[in-house]
Amino acid sequence: MKRSHTVVALAVVGLFFLVPLVWSQDPMMVMEHKEIGPHQRPLVDFNHDKHTATLECIRCHHDYDEHGNNRGGDDSAQSCAGCHNPTARGGKVPLLQAFHGQCKGCHEVMGGQGRKSGPVMCGECHVRK
């Protein structure tokens, strides 16, 4: 009986460490969306881990109902272009505007509150290498 408890305990501990690995995203992502067309500026390197340390997932992975309430997002971590298209079809915010509004807007709000924030100027995100 004691042995089965040990096996169960090890399985639970193993799942505790395995689950975050399965559902996590890459720590660094390159924000490249071919749906926008040819990019006029260098692609943005996005540190996903740095953002998830301080923000709730639904801040970016969102789903708004008809009343503007954030219902959260689905757990599949689909691409932004899954909902936001290059134009304003379907009443959604266009993809490029969604990126700038979400990223730059959040950085401006946090900076305005005196909190540590990220870049807000074009060349600070779109870095020439």
Image (cartoon, rainbow, N blue to C red):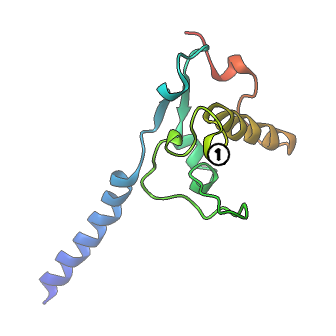
Left or right: 32 with respect to 19?
right
Residue corresponding to mark 1:
92
SS for callout 1: loop
For the residue pair 71 and 82, the one nearer the viewer reads as: 82
Residue 78 image offset from top left, x and y in percent:
45, 47
Residue 64 seen from this side: yes
**Residue 51, quarter of the rendered image:** top right
**Residue 107, quarter of the rendered image:** top right
Give the answer, above or below, for where 97 lies relative to 70.
above
Quarter of the rendering occupied by the N terminus: bottom left
| Residue at x 54% of width, y 35% of height | 47
**Residue 5, quarter of the rendered image:** bottom left
Residue 33 seen from this side: no
Give the answer, above or below, for where 46 lies relative to 50.
above
Instruction: Say what amino acid the circle numbered 1 marks.
Output: Lys
Residue 20 image offset from top left, x and y in percent:
38, 56
Name, please, the residue furthest toward the front: 89
Left or right: 49 with respect to 60?
left
Name, please, the residue furthest toward the bottom: 1
Left or right: 98 with respect to 31?
right
Residue 6 image offset from top left, x and y in percent:
19, 78
| Residue at x 45% of width, y 58% of height | 75
